[in-house]
Structure formats: C-alpha cells, structure tokens
Amino acid sequence: MRELTYVARNTVEWREAPDPKLRGDGEAIVAPVAATSCDVDTAILAGHGFIEPPFALGHECVARVVETGDAVTTVTPGDLVVVPWSISCGGCDHCRAGRTAHCTAVPHMAMYGAPIGGTWGGLFSDLVRVPYADAMLVPLPAGLDPVAMASAGDNWSLAWRLVAPHLRSRPGARVLVVARGSIGLYVADIARALGASTVLHVDPDPGHREIARGFGAATAETLDPPVHHGFDIAVEATGRVDQLALAVKSLAPEGICESAGNHFRPGELPLLDMYLTGVTLRVARDNVRAHIPDALALAGSGKVDPARVVSHVLDWEQLPEALPEKHLKPVFVRSGGPAGP
C-alpha cells in the first residue's frame, strides 16, 4: 500500500509500505474514503512542527471497514466509520473517565499522523490498522455526508467540545472566536446553533470571515486592542500566544478560555490581568473519542452545516500536489468513495 509521507517543508510524497495486518481479534483494517487536513497539519507542512520528517501524515478521516477480527462486534466490513485521531483502548481508567487522549494501554500521546507514542501510520494512507476497533471506531450515522464529516475524528468534534458544554452551563453566553482555520469556523457555527447571544469571529482571512458571517457571527479582521470584559467564553485556535493573550484579556470576570492552538513557539500571557479577572484557561489535546457521538448528533440535527467549511473536494491521487497548497479545509476522496457536498 501507499502512505502519504511528509518529507520536507511543504513537501509530501507517496511511499510504499507493507499492507497492515490484524494483530489481534479486537482489531480492524480500514480504508480512508474521505480524509482532510487538520489545522495543525498546515503548521507541520509549513515547517513549524517539532518532529523531524519523514513520517506518515493525516489524522482526520471517514473510512470504510475492510476487515475485522473475530472479537469485533460494533462494526462490520463495508461500514463507514469515523476514525479518532488518538489511539485509545476504551477500557483503562483514563478511557473510562473520557480521557481517551491519555490512554494508559498505549505509549503516551499515541496518535495517527505523527510518530508520537509509537508509529501508527497516517490517515492519508490506503489502509490503516485500528488496534481497538470496538472502542475507537464510530459508525457514521445514515444521512451524514462523509465529505462534510471528514473532520469528525478531530476538528469537528473538538469544536463541539470547545463551546457546547460551556453554553450548556452558561446559556446565552457571549462567545469570542480568535482563529485562523477550520476549528474556529466550526466553533462559530456550533455556538450560534446552541444559543450564544453573540459570536464574534476574528480572522485576518476575508474568505473565512465570509463563511463565519454565513453562520450568523459578527466578524473582525483583528482584535487589537482587546474587547475588555466583552465575552463569557473565548476560543483561541491560532497557535499564536499573542492572540491567546488578546483572547483572555477580552473575557468577562470568571470567563472561560479554551485554547485549541498548537503552540509550537513560546510567548507570554497577561497573568496579572488573568488573575484579577478570574480566568479559567484550558490548553489541551482533545479527548475526542468521548465527544464524537454528541458532535455527530448535532451535525445530523440540521442546526449546523459543517459542509460549508469544506473548501475543496479533490481526488485522492491529488494529495501530493494539493495538500501543501493553502486551502482552508480540502477533503480528498478516494475513487469510488463518497461524492462531495
């Protein structure tokens, strides 16, 4: 089979690898049919990551089950499934508590798309082994478009977690989104759908702002100076500490800030301002498997439209040439796979 391999800045190529084989009765082999780039993949391709190439890339996809072990009960060959980005067993104490990004059955930080916590391959590959099929794979509900939901294994479900639980406890909250890519747009859509009284989406890209306005959000090119005490919830998804600082300085007293940015570069936060305001800040890799069912249910409700964030639908064979290009949310579809939205 082939793996799409990151080899140098803005350079990926197909490389041959052995076909994955089942190593136990609880495993599955899947074939990605609609795969997309995460916002962090853009940073990696730009040379901002901390892992030296080469390695197999990709950790967001909807896949078709090809083969299952005898003990697998939740999926069968032919099923369309969401593949979570992190490897989790479903049975350890952390997994049972919903902390699936910290599974103790595998090395720390085990994931697809980067050789962290072992080598698990990437989801821009022809075939992928899923070690804990019953725990990891989530059947795609009927009626949901695999292209629109290609990001459900990470960014879409992450965006749900960044804002939905907070709006449940703070109905009608004012939400600030400081973003550069798809995560922020998903958050804007979800926040308005779940009853935020105000959503301000800050992004320098005019095309992104247009999409956000289509979701009913107000938009701005920059947030400088910060809107003092203007928001109850802030979501930062830029990977830039200066933007995170602006977000936390815009919070109302006892406000909540969620940082989904991968902060590869150091910086300073306004800790005294945060102390005086009473800010709760969470910076974390997401325990996405626990949130996928709720995020899929929202996608199927008709209240949101994740397909509007898909910028391009491209053929699987275009991956080496098209992935390094600066697209918002390209989805690569395998020949014979699902049609685009």
Image: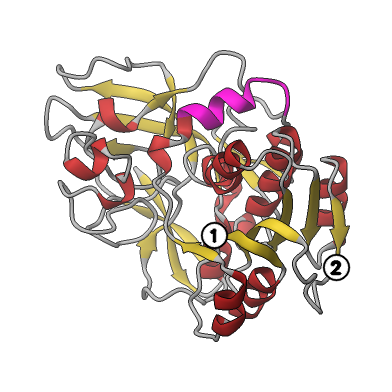
The residue segment tinted magenta is 293-303
Numbered label attached to residue 303: none
Tell me the residue at 74%/35% (across/down): 195
Which residue in the protein does label 1 denote?
260
Above or below 6: residue 66: above
Above or below 338: residue 253: below
Across and down, in percent, residue 89 comes to 21, 38
Q: Magenta region, mostly helix, strand or loop?
A: helix
As helix, strand or loop, the secondary structure at mark 2 comes to loop
Front one among 293 and 50: 293
Q: Distance between the residues labelled 1 and 2?
A: 19 Å
Q: Could you tell me if residue 189 is visible in this image?
A: yes
Q: Give residue 299's quadrant in the image.
A: top right
Q: Give residue 285's quadrant in the image.
A: bottom left
Which residue in the protein does label 2 denote?
221
Q: In which quarter of the image is the C terminus?
A: top right
Q: Quadrant of the N terminus?
A: top left
Across and down, in percent, residue 9 comes to 52, 75
Tell me the residue at 43%/51% (across/down): 286
Front one among 81 and 316: 81
Across and down, in percent, residue 287 comes to 39, 46
Residues under numbered marks 1 and 2 in contact, where contact means CB atoms less than 8 Å apart: no
Front one among 268 and 230: 230
User: Is 203 inside the magenta-drawn segment?
Assistant: no
Type of amino acid under label 1: Ala
User: Is 295 inside the magenta-drawn segment?
Assistant: yes
As helix, strand or loop, the secondary structure at mark 1 comes to loop
Across and down, in percent, residue 6 comes to 44, 64
